[in-house]
Image: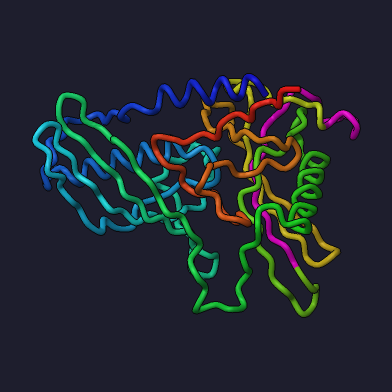
């Protein structure tokens, strides 16, 4: 735990400065397209949970009354894609969700600054699931800690590990989505999406030893993204895409080793059903102080 707080403190120091962009920026309107693209890359790069986002629209621009350095606030609308952050596919190639899949929309205000060190000064995003008006019978989005949904996640993960050809044991990285729908034939069905990571344990590890299995280092670990369907209390199917080892900074941290929980202080809705875009610079919770005797 001490190591996590040390990392948080280090990140706070590193990320309180401007996120540098690659091109020069003088706050001119003709530069907005490039600036927006740079902002999207940085937002996705710093988004360490859930799914990648794509731009839907630039809603407005506001030039700040500053001579040096200049500042422009861009109001952007983003939508969540189907690519989880462990997927190496560029976010520009990722498919957006349909209305029936419950879109997740982020309304972001991004402050760009020019001068000698152009970049993103800050951004905040209001991330919300879209309301379903056209499809009341579509699967509904559930909290990421829904007990029945987590039972499906756990069962699907065990099924993958027992049936796959991989020699390593994979454990849960995080739950991406849980949806549910009532079916006349099967009853209440659950549809879950979750990310997994390769561990140091062999796939033959005994049940009592699974919780102790640690993920391999970034450059050695394969990551995966799984989608599973639990039809009532009977049929369970799971399909996982496994990605080769890569340099991956997206390692969600959690206090719960079995079911990692979304972390974004002050921006996670209660109960949480999505992974919101956290603000930049990031905010961290203070470490609890031990009571003195």
Magenta segment's dominant SS is: strand
Residue 96 in percent (x, y) is at 45, 57
Magenta-colored stretch includes residue 20: no
**Magenta segment boundaries in residue numbering:** 189-210
Quarter of the image where one finds residue 219: top right
* Above or below, comparing residue 119 to residue 59 in the picture: above
Q: Identify the residue at horizontal 23%, vertical 41% (top origin).
A: 35
Quarter of the image where one finds residue 148: bottom right
* Above or below, comparing residue 284 to residue 84 in the picture: above
Quarter of the image where one finds residue 201: top right
Q: Identify the residue at horizontal 77%, vertical 61% (top origin).
A: 230
Residue 292 in percent (x, y) is at 71, 23
Magenta-colored stretch includes residue 208: yes
Q: Nearer the viewer, residue 172 or 293?
A: 293
Residue 113 in percent (x, y) is at 21, 35
Residue 160 in percent (x, y) is at 77, 43
**Residue sitting at the far left:** 67
Q: Nearer the viewer, residue 182 or 163?
A: 182
Q: Identify the residue at horizontal 41%, vertical 55% (top origin).
A: 106
Q: Nearer the viewer, residue 226 or 10?
A: 10
């Amino acid at each position: 735990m001490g190591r996590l707080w040390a990392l948080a403190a280090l990140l706070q120091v590193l990320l309180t400065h401007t996120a540098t962009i690659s091109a020069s920026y003088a706050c001119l309107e003709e530069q907005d397209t490039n600036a927006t693209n740079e902002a999207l890359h940085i937002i996705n790069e710093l988004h360490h949970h859930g799914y990648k986002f794509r731009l839907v629209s630039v809603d407005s621009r506001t030039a700040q009354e500053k001579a040096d350095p200049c500042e422009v606030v861009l109001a952007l609308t983003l939508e969540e894609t189907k690519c989880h952050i462990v997927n190496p596919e560029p976010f520009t190639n990722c498919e957006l969700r349909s209305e029936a899949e419950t879109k997740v929309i982020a309304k972001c205000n991004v402050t760009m600054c020019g001068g000698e060190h152009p970049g993103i000064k800050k951004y905040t995003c209001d991330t919300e699931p879209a309301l379903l008006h056209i499809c009341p019978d579509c699967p509904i989005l559930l909290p990421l800690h829904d007990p029945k949904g987590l039972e499906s996640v756990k069962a699907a993960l065990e099924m993958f590990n027992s049936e796959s050809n991989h020699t390593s044991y994979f454990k849960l990285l995080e739950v991406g989505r849980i949806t549910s729908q009532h079916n006349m034939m099967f009853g209440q069905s659950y549809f879950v999406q979750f990310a997994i990571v390769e561990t140091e344990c062999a796939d033959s590890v005994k049940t009592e030893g699974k919780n102790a299995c640690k993920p391999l280092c970034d450059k050695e670990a394969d990551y995966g993204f799984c989608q599973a369907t639990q039809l009532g209390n009977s049929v369970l199917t799971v399909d996982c895409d496994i990605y080769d080892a890569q340099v991956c900074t997206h390692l969600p941290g959690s206090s719960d080793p079995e079911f990692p929980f979304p972390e974004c202080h002050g921006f996670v809705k209660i109960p949480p059903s999505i992974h919101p875009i956290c603000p930049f610079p990031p905010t961290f919770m203070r470490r609890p102080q031990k009571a003195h005797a």
